[in-house]
Amino acid sequence: MMGRNTGARDYPTLMPRQLQIKYYVEPDSAALARRAAQYFVEMVSEAVEAHGRARIAISGGTTPKAAFQLLADPNQPWRWRMPWEKLDLFWVDERCVPPDNSESNYRMTREALLDHVPLRPSQIHRIEGELEPEVAAARYESELRNSFRLEGAESPRFDLVALGLGDDGHTASLFPHTEAIHEMSRLATANRVPQRDTWRITLTWPVINQARSVFFLVAGAEKAAILHEVLTGPRDPERLPSQLISPASGILSFILDKDAAALLPASDEEGCGVLERER
Ligand code: 6PG
């Protein structure tokens, strides 16, 4: 099992075990958003069924926005099927900007979703991007510890973590060749991203891998090559941090549009495909 950060920057050489990668391919971005909205409702409802509440962590960027808008739309079924009162919403990562900044993941989510659905402030656990990066990361870690009532070295277990894939192979704010890739003892960390001359706050990959369910939402032809490399290429997490995502459940899901899935083995008539990858 993964021990505390030994300071040695190595990856736990777990016995290679297969990771089952399930991918669902949708014909276009509108169908992708509908599938993602459906998936959010199903996974949240399952968690509420199983243990009375659902704690999920969402990503920013552009791809999830349309799904958030569908979840908020009163003319769509998902708005009425989501058990909002049982949901606690967290973020996977945040940019180091104030919550009203156009770059803010919180702002994107507020405008697309939060302003339109019945979530109380106590159910919304945002990352305070406006603070000093180290302070924001430490406060978010305390928020996670308090919300999940963690003790000692316990790790939070999200019911669902929704990720995106950057065209450089990053996910969350785990960028290639950055410090956060090596952080295994903290729950959240401040990450200097020299290639973007910025700081980010991000959940660490061991926390993401503890989640009951983890899925990537990926769209567009510009992501096809990097997705193919992450899923079928040699293991190189330093260069492709998305390869660090290997949930303890042994299953990793991808919801894709046809263009993003273009280089993957053909899916079946239902648009489903499966790959096995060494952990
Ligand atoms: C962020 C995200 C990041 C995102 C990818 C994909 O803060 O930017 O959390 O990890 O998911 O960069 O972004 P797009 O969906 O915009 O392609």
Image: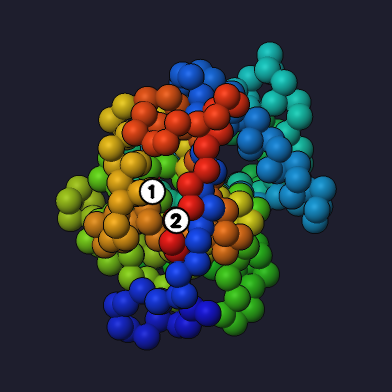
Q: Is residue 126 visible?
A: no
Q: Secondary structure at mark 2?
A: strand
Which residue is drawn at the image coordinates 37% and 85% (left, top)?
6
- Residue kind at label 1, given as amino acid type: Leu
- State the residue position of label 1: 231
Q: Is 62 placed above or below 182 here?
A: above
Three-letter amino acid code of the residue under disc 2: Arg
Q: Is mark 2 within 8 Å of ligand 1?
A: no
Reply above or below: 60 against 270: below
The one of 180 and 74 positioned closer to us in this rendering: 180
Classify 251 as above or below 134.
above
Disc assigned to residue 244: none
At label 1, counting other C-alpha atoms closer than 10 Å, the crowd grade (few under 14, some 14-19, many 20 or more) is: some
Residue at image location 61% in from the left, 60% down from the top: 249
State the residue position of label 2. Answer: 277
Q: Position of residue 274 (x, y in %)?
A: 52, 43
Q: Is residue 152 above or below residue 58?
A: below
Q: Quarter-wise, where is residue 150 in the image?
A: bottom right
Mark 2, Cα crowd under 10 Å, few <14 / some 14-19 / many 20+, is some
